[in-house]
Amino acid sequence: MRTIGQIVKNARTGKRLSLKDLEGKTKIKAAFVQSIEKENWQDLPPFPTVLGFVKSLSGELGIDEKMAVAVLKRDYPLKNLNINPKETKKVFTWSPKLTFTVGVGAIVLAVLGYLAFQYIRFVSPPTLVIESPVEGQVINGNSVLVFGQTDPDAKVIVDNEPVLTDEDGKFSVNIDITPTTKEISIEATSRSGKERIINRTINIQSD
């Protein structure tokens, strides 16, 4: 069974061509041609280049190209044969180290989120919802009921009078009014001193 080296050498000598002659015709260095004939693969470029050499030599020497390529692949050392190597896909595996890293990351994010929430809450005015009186409410009598809700830790003042809140921030108080009273002012102040004020216009109905 002939090797690729024997096939190339026999075809070259059959055409009475020297290594230099063949180099001039194919532009393949004579040393490379000689290494192919002697199958000194370690002296040759990578396999794709050698494959190109064999195809060029086949065309110049009248060798069947398909046969020459097949013989080259058979003779070329397998460990050096590297034609379009398939990439090895990395398989994802969940490791204890990854579990620890994800856990720590989740805790850090939770803590940072909580601190950010508390900071925003600290520097922002408190919420304040007034259910009574409504804007433009008509009042009969000499007092008006004021009730609503704010943040649990906020202080509430209604027309300059401090008002107690329950644990949910709800408050309710009766404020004395006079026939000249036109407006009720409700003020909520957070621990950081931020204020939110709501003024409600009222209409006193005289008898």
Image: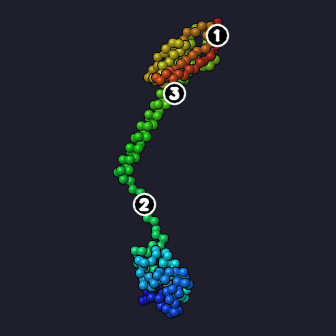
Residue at figure coordinates x 41%, y 77% from the top left: 42
Badge 2: few (under 14), some or many (20 or more) residues near its Cα, within 10 Å? few
Label 3 or label 1, whichever lies nearer to me, is 3
User: Mark 3 or mark 1, which has the lower sequence index?
Assistant: 3
Residue at figure coordinates x 48%, y 71% from the top left: 84
Q: CA distance from mark 2 to mark 1?
A: 82 Å
The residue pinned by badge 2 equals 90
Examine the rendered structure and indicate whether residue 95 appears above or below residue 103.
below
User: What amino acid is labelled 2 in the image?
Assistant: Lys
Label 2 or label 1, whichever lies nearer to me, is 2
Determine whether the residue tagged by mark 2 lies in a helix, strand or loop.
Answer: loop
Determine whether the residue tagged by mark 3 lies in a helix, strand or loop.
Answer: loop
User: What amino acid is labelled 3 in the image?
Assistant: Ser
Residue 6: x and y, percent?
A: 45, 88
Residue at figure coordinates x 49%, y 75% from the top left: 48
Q: Residue furthest top?
A: 207
Badge 3: few (under 14), some or many (20 or more) residues near its Cα, within 10 Å? some
- On the question of residue 158 being in view, the answer is yes
Examine the rendered structure and indicate whether residue 156 appears above or below residue 178.
below
Q: Please state which of residues 112 and 21 is positioned toward the viewer in this rendering.
A: 21
The residue pinned by badge 1 equals 205
Examine the rendered structure and indicate whether residue 4 appears above or below residue 116.
below
Name the mark on residue 97.
none
Residue 11: x and y, percent?
A: 50, 90
Determine whether the residue tagged by mark 1 lies in a helix, strand or loop.
Answer: strand
User: What amino acid is labelled 1 in the image?
Assistant: Gln
The residue pinned by badge 3 equals 124
Q: Please state which of residues 99 and 132 is positioned toward the viewer in this rendering.
A: 99
Q: CA distance from mark 3 to mark 2?
A: 49 Å
The image quadrant where one finds the C terminus is top right
